[in-house]
Image: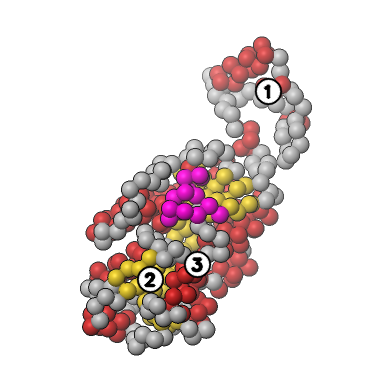
Amino acid sequence: MTAAPLSLVPPRFAFRGNRRAPRTGLHGAHPLMAAVAAAAALAAGWLPGAASAADFPAKPIRFIVPYAAGGTTDLVARTVGQKVAEKLGQPVVVENRPGAGGNIGMEAVAKAVPDGYTIGFGAISTNALNPHIYKHVPFDPRKDFTAVSLLGTSTIVLEVSNSLPVKTVSELVSYAKAHPGLTYATAGTGTSMHLAGAMFSQMTQAGLTHVPYKGSSPAINDMLGGHVQVMFDNLPASLPHIQGGKLRALAVAGKSRSPALPNVPTLAEAGLAGYAVEPWFGVYGPAGMPAPVVQALNAAFVEALGNADVKDKLVQAGFNPKGSSAAELQSLTLSEYEKFGKVAKSASISVD
């Protein structure tokens, strides 16, 4: 017969928000009574954190974004985080912790206490690609995180400066072959945009040379200034310049056209059969988070992503919001990890 879990703290004395519970129960009891209670709790199968999981959340949640403020991930985190906070009744504090292609921020998530109060904004780069291209990654995406929910996908756009005399993908390929040394810019080495450019250059034999920047903004500035003429970028960063006629979109890299650019074809439609790179993003916590906490967070994020105002704002920015179950995100992580490991190896993508 299995013993029933022992309640060490009467319900009326449980922690609520910032109120301090009376010094009773395990932590405030006489040493002998505390020892007896601890032994009984272990015998009953009670684990620290079980009571807090039932009351989750009782304090603000830290949402680590492993990229600089002002980018796509930051926009999504703050927009969705606000709705999640409304649902859970506690603030969601976005903390930007950039560096090493997102590895620094996600390392902080992996090493956090698995109580649900620290979660991270993972991506195709941090959780599928980076382990294959960086010499040292301080976590294993397959086992050091708890998947919570997919956030959605972004669109990578192939764009050129107005000074380049091409208007289609086929014209770009012909121009590149006739002008050896043509370069393309991305937001950095090892990003999904770099992956998209490497695959494009491989499949077309265009011979493009990669020029990595430290983020989209400086690369876009050089595109506008005529210092580089081709770029693979996350659509939200480049969309205003495309809509303003300052940059020319030739194609998008995903499986389908972007609602923000309905007249721009996919690269597959433009002649590269089978080509598809679609950056995805998801919420992860440290490994070992309690199931009730994961369920509470998942429900809050899925609801927030389905909110009409949130969807409209993100779609207009070029992001495609979409929630998922925790199991679906974990399955995606594992399959993409294997897929892009092979791609990174064949394209010889590495970061020193």
Q: CA distance from mark 1 to mark 2?
A: 58 Å
Instruction: Residue 35: tell me if it is visible.
Output: yes
Task: Looking at the picture, tell me which residue is in the foreground, 317 or 295.
Answer: 317
Q: Please state which amino acid type lies under the numbered disc 3.
A: Asn
Q: Is residue 350 left or right of residue 98?
A: left
| Magenta stretch, residue numbers | 96-109
Q: Which mark is residue 27?
A: 1
Q: CA distance from mark 3 to mark 1?
A: 48 Å
Residue drawn at x 60%, y 43% is: 117
Q: Earlier in the sequence, mark 3 or mark 2?
A: 2
Q: Earlier in the sequence, mark 1 or mark 2?
A: 1
Residue drawn at x 33%, y 53% is: 352
Query: Label 3's element?
Result: strand
Residue denoted by label 3:
320
Q: Is residue 271 left or right of residue 185?
A: left
Q: Which mark is residue 185?
A: 2
| Contact between labelled residues 1 and 3, with CB atoms less than 8 Å apart | no
Q: Please state which amino acid type lies under the numbered disc 2.
A: Ala
Q: Position of residue 92 (x, y in %)?
A: 64, 52
Residue drawn at x 31%, y 56% is: 350
